[in-house]
């Protein structure tokens, strides 16, 4: 492990140490890292694997749900109360009272969650600060907590804060699609951690974000200096996400990825497009990679549009299983209203499937000219794009094949890891 103090070592000596010994001890922290739902678990898995392949020692410090990791990467669990494993009050109460030696963070977590807040980010940061007091690392890469605990750690260890996009965007769309004052108050309470993040973000020394669009939004919404923000795109696993030449596409089958009832993903507009197409294509079918929320908004909309026979949810799939679903499908649709970096966009392109995606936020940065870009919130545009591809599949398949090469050339994890490595060395030097 390389330990450097600016008062004891000059820059030339510092550089010579790194030439002789490139191996670092790197901690990557993530307040939650679900391996299937959302992109955080995917990001943690890929980044740790890529940095390890460059010869570094990598530990993951995560709250639940925990990520899947490569066998040689160590997982340090920071469990907290994990209250969001259930929304049943009696079960949450049992979790809290069964916890021995309760800390102030445990009490805060329980009371905040009881009143509709999301306290995990703050309490994870506090626990992380305590945990790293006696664990020697050369650098900490924190995955989007922007917590007071991370700010405290910044005094003791070099830190790179990953901000995929400012969560102000999630809040904006959740408020926009809320119905009634009660829902709006509920969303305001849930996103109360944004007050902390807005205080912490300007004080962080180094931030990395995966797109220029996200950089601009961080500057605007979090009041961060542009000089502190590096743009390093996420990579795409184009080995596992690849075409399956031995699989024939099912007639009329489409595919999308969407978290249950998250307005930002724009699933409503894809469902309405399917409704418009059903008359001419009665056997049209949409595969949704994600978990439905029982009795939720999306389920009610599917029933209202009479699409129960046309919609299939598939959850907890491995990369290989998702790639197979892409191979069976004719078109991938990403109807998001916002993406800091859309993994489903890159994964679909890596699988050489014709892609329809909204022309918003970071999506054009990923797709370049290799997707059918459409306006957001526009079911008619989705419908028309699907019809075009159905009528001339060979034309759009040629573009999809070129799109896969675009992903391989620009979003390979080994190339991305070297960009992170360079930023790591710069961050240690500045510290």
Image (tube, grey):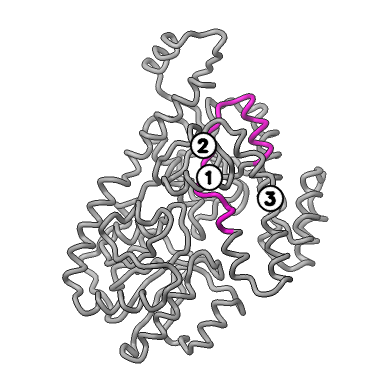
Task: Kindly identify the residue that appears in the image at 29 percent across and 68 percent down.
Answer: 327
Eye-nearest disc, 1 or 2: 1
Q: Residues within 10 Å of mark 2 (few under 14, many from 20)?
A: many
Estimate the x, y position of residue 256 in percent, counting from the top left. Answer: 40, 69
**Based on the displayed image, in which of its 4 quarters is residue 321 positioned?**
bottom left
Answer whether residue 410 is magenta in the image: no
Q: Which residue is mark 2?
A: 207
> In the rendered view, does 245 fall on the left or right side of 381?
left
Q: Write the residue at 48% across / 54% down.
A: 39
In the image, residue 282 sits, relative to residue 105, either above or below, namely below
Determine the residue positioned at 44% across, 81% down: 272
Q: CA distance from mark 3 to mark 1?
A: 16 Å
Sequence-wise, which precedes: disc 1 or disc 2? 2
Q: In the image, which residues are magenta?
A: 147-170
Query: Which label number is shown at residue 218?
Result: 1
Circle 3 sits on which residue?
A: 193
User: How many angstroms separate mark 3 from mark 2 (CA)?
Assistant: 19 Å
Q: Which marked residue is nearer to the observer: mark 3 or mark 1?
A: 1
């Amino acid at each position: 492990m390389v330990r450097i103090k600016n008062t004891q070592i000059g820059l030339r000596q510092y550089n010579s140490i790194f030439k002789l010994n490139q191996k670092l001890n790197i901690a990557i922290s993530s307040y939650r890292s679900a391996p299937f739902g959302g992109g955080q678990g995917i990001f943690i898995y890929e980044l740790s694997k890529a940095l390890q392949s460059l010869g570094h020692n990598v530990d993951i410090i995560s709250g639940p749900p925990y990520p899947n990791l490569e066998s040689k990467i160590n997982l340090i669990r920071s469990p907290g109360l994990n209250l969001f494993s259930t929304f049943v009050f009696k079960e949450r109460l049992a979790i809290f009272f069964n916890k021995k030696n309760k800390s102030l963070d445990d009490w805060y977590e329980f009371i905040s969650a009881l009143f509709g807040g999301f306290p995990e980010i703050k309490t994870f940061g506090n626990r992380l600060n305590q945990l790293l007091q006696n664990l020697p690392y050369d650098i900490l890469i924190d995955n989007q907590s922007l917590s007071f605990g991370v700010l405290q750690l910044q005094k003791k260890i070099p830190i790179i804060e990953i901000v995929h996009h400012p969560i102000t965007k999630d809040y904006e769309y959740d408020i926009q699609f809320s119905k009634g004052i009660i829902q709006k108050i509920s969303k305001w309470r849930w996103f109360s951690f944004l007050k902390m993040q807005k205080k912490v973000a300007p004080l962080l020394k180094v931030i990395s974000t995966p797109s220029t669009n996200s950089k601009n939004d961080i500057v605007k919404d979090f009041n961060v200096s542009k000089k502190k923000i590096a743009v390093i795109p996420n990579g795409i696993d184009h080995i596992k996400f690849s075409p399956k030449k031995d699989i024939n596409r099912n007639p009329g089958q489409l595919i999308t990825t969407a978290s249950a009832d998250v307005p930002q993903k724009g699933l409503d507009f894809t469902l309405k497009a399917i409704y418009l197409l059903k008359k001419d294509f009665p056997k049209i079918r949409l595969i949704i990679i994600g978990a439905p929320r029982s009795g939720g908004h999306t389920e009610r909309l599917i029933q209202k549009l009479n699409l129960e026979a046309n919609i299939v949810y598939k959850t907890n799939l491995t990369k290989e299983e998702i790639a197979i679903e892409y191979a069976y499908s004719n078109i991938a649709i990403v109807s998001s209203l916002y993406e800091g970096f859309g993994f489903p966009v890159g994964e679909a392109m890596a699988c050489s499937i014709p892609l329809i995606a909204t022309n918003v936020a970071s999506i054009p940065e990923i797709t370049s000219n290799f997707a059918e870009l459409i306006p957001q919130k526009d079911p008619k545009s989705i419908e028309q794009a699907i019809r075009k591809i159905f009528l001339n599949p060979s034309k759009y398949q040629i573009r999809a094949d070129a799109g896969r090469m675009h992903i391989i050339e620009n979003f390979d994890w080994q190339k991305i890891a070297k960009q992170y490595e360079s930023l790591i060395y710069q961050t240690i030097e500045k510290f």
